[in-house]
Image: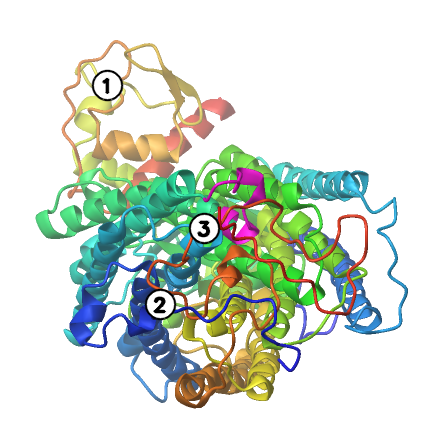
Amino acid sequence: MLSFLMPEAASAQAVKTDDIYYLLLGISAVIILVVSALVIGFSIRYRRGSKAKRGAMPAFFSREFEIGWTSATLILALFLFWWAASSQLSGLLAPKGALEIHVVAKQWMWKTQHPNGASEINELHAPIDTPVRLVMTSQDVIHSFFVPAFRMKQDVVPGRYTETWFNATKLGVFHLFCAEYCGTDHSRMLGKIVVMSKEDYGRWLSAQPQGDNLANEGAVIFEARGCSGCHAESSKVHAPKLRGIYGRPVQLAGGKSVIADDAYLRDSMLMPKRDIVAGYEPIMPSYKGILDDGEIQSLTAYIRSLSTEGEKR
Amino acid sequence: MTDATLDGELPLSLEPSYLGAGHSLASWLTSTDHKRIAILYAISITFFFFLGGIAITIVRIELFTPEADVVSADTYNKLFTFHGIIMVWFFLVPSIPTTLGNFLLPLMIGARDVAFPKLNLFSWYLNITGGLCTMYALIAGGVDTGWTFYTPFSTMFSNTHVIAAAMGVFIAGFSSIAAGVNFIATTHMLRAPGMTWFRLPLFVWAMYATSLVMVLATPVLAVTLLLLIMERWLHLPIFNPALGGDPILFQHLFWFYSHPAVYIMVLPAMGVVSEVITCFARRRVFGYDFMVYAMVGIAVIGFFVWGHHMFVAGQSPYASIIFSFLSFIVAVPSAIKVFNWTATLYRGQISFEAPMMYALGFLGLFTVGGLTGLFLASIPVDIHVTDTYFVVAHFHYIMVGGSVSAYFAGLHYWWPKITGRLYSEAWARFAAILMFFGFNFTFFPQFIAGYLGMPRRYHVYPPEFQVYNVMSSTGAVVLAAAYLLPLFYLGRSLIWGARAGNNPWDATGLEWQTTSPPPRENFPVIPRVAGTPYDYHPVTEAPTSGRRNVHSESDQG
């Protein structure tokens, strides 16, 4: 398609989105043509004083006619809904085992962090043909992670994690925009998505100044911030042990259960009194103002690593 | 106009017109006459329209080039914010209801005034107070939150005059509520004998449906803005996540008002266009009862689609699916209306005076706006185009292409009724055509730029988008000229315009059965209504090109 009408399509989702877009364009074009042909046609034929025969209103032009086009419009609307919604649902969740990248947004920059700890500012290097899951949060206001070439956008909200994912199908450098208005330099909060071959990505990653591996970093914080005093395996304090809980349901006091995902773990660190695990006293203090978003991500990575180790055994 | 003759019309009344009932400034500022209050509103919204227009003119000039070259980033942000707040709450929401609605609703149902004339005047003062409050925010240094006031930016991060601006909108909201209550009560209580619900002109139905939305949705906006002010001023933890608040809650509350607000803007436009198209096609409206059901349907379903503004905000994906479904459904009644207006032209006797030109322009632009709404109801497409120029183009097609064109259609159609004068038909047609093309020239390129990925509210932008922005800014020059023209030819007609006579369009509504301009009490004798509103031809026959045999429906008994 001509590049001045259509953006580059560089992900699997981009092709699906464009298909819906083309269908809608086609339907719109037909409707606009029919309506304007009728309006212009009637305007000419039935202009005041024209010789066109009017006569009595024809029988077909009646209530049944109205019910007919109402039903046709309704069916068209339902079909479009079904098509768009089913396409959306099938791509909702990232495949298991997707590469997980953490994103922290703040006025007016993007920080991205790879699983091995390498981090970037206003850039994200990613391998081609690999599902990449983004786990994002903001340190201040709402931002939005928008990559037009992937037809992908997700708001990045302070105080919670939001997620999205992509599977790049083209090598190249693509725009990353902040799409949610965030203050003075909103329009300068830009970045680049660099899609590389898998080998190049591996080489690039190993050439990065090795930040500590995110999980190892988390293990250090786990000791340094005193989490281990209660939550370590060896601790005598009656506190929930963390091995194997990531991604599993946790039974709460009060009978509900929740999945121990990133958001739950974050809440448990910052608002420990909110969801108490069944069988434990609410004794944990809040770490709000003590842990920053980067540290929370590292701790979360550490807790996750405890689970995957468990699976290997 | 040449076919406007005076035979068969009411004699020019012995009573002075409402315009002659006092010439002092105080006689206007303290009047409880719905017609005079309509004029007060018309003056204030025209002022706000051009104020908001100046702000966006500077924005469009800045966007001629990708770099920053006219204003700073902060100034840019304040300009588009001011444009949005002024245009939404001080022009579009009050536009048709408080001017044409105020003037015509009592006339169309055969009443002497609205149900609560003093409340009507009070609502104008509320609107002005709100406007002054928001203008204070501008003069004091501006607001930079966008018209959407998203938290936590608006409550915790912005260093601008958010409270004053939000307070202005809060106060203006009560003027909306007052107008809605007034119109509902008027329609229920003051209909003339014989004016049954299904004999109401569609414009009255549109005002009624709009009023329902105003009365039910605006209080939610008031609560939301109050919470926002509380958080910003008193640091009450409501939306701020740092204190356990929920910023997404603000968006739910905000759009629970602001999506129905779109229908506050477009339902009145539908009412105006229904009146104009029937008159200039000389036809009974096609499917009157479906038109009524469609408007009430839009007003009701419109309350349940707000979540389509939040597909990327972090709401549950299953909630998004439901909102997507309802958004497709709400498109159906709008489509019905477009088909019915088109069908009304069939076998008509169509003429193309200025009001009809504006109304046909509405039809085209509203159709494009409505169809692009389907794109935004489709979740995958919406994810891509949310917060891009595609959305900007879409809602301008509905609110400016649609509502503003209809406002001009109505203004030209009822101008002879309101002022008793005729404007220059040639200039008016020229302005209508210029507005249609200027509008498309300005906003169509934004669909393309948006799908290519240009985000909205960008002060600087990547150079590949420049061509679309140059087209848009150039189109805006044409559009600005088209909006300025009516000031001159309508203004001129006030003094030099020919006398219009009582019913220059040979229209059927009750408002045309009294003198132009109408007397203070509207009708010498309350009319008795015997038939349907669009009695342009016998039910089973086609209209003839000759003049309709005007029979006054006012019954001296």
Q: Are marks 3 and 2 in contact (CB under 8 Å)?
A: no
Q: Where residue A3 appears, x then y in whole percent? A: 69, 74
Check disc 1 and report the residue beneath it: A234
Q: Is residue B422 above or below residue B401?
A: below
User: Mark 3 or mark 2, which has the lower sequence index?
Assistant: 2
Q: Is residue A20 left or right of residue B174?
A: right
Residue occupying the point 17% across, 41% down: B237
- The amino acid marked with disc number 3 is Gly
Is residue B198 rendered magenta in the image?
yes
- The amino acid marked with disc number 2 is Glu
Q: Is residue B231 above or below residue B19?
A: above
Q: Are marks 3 and 1 in contact (CB under 8 Å)?
A: no
In the picture, the disc for residue B110 is 3
Q: Quadrant of residue B496?
A: bottom left
Q: Colour mode?
A: rainbow
In the picture, the disc for residue B15 is 2
Q: Is residue B138 left or right of residue B247?
A: left
Residue occupying the point 52% across, 42% down: B195
Q: Which residues are magenta?
A: B192-205
Q: Where residue A30 appears, x then y in whole percent? A: 79, 59
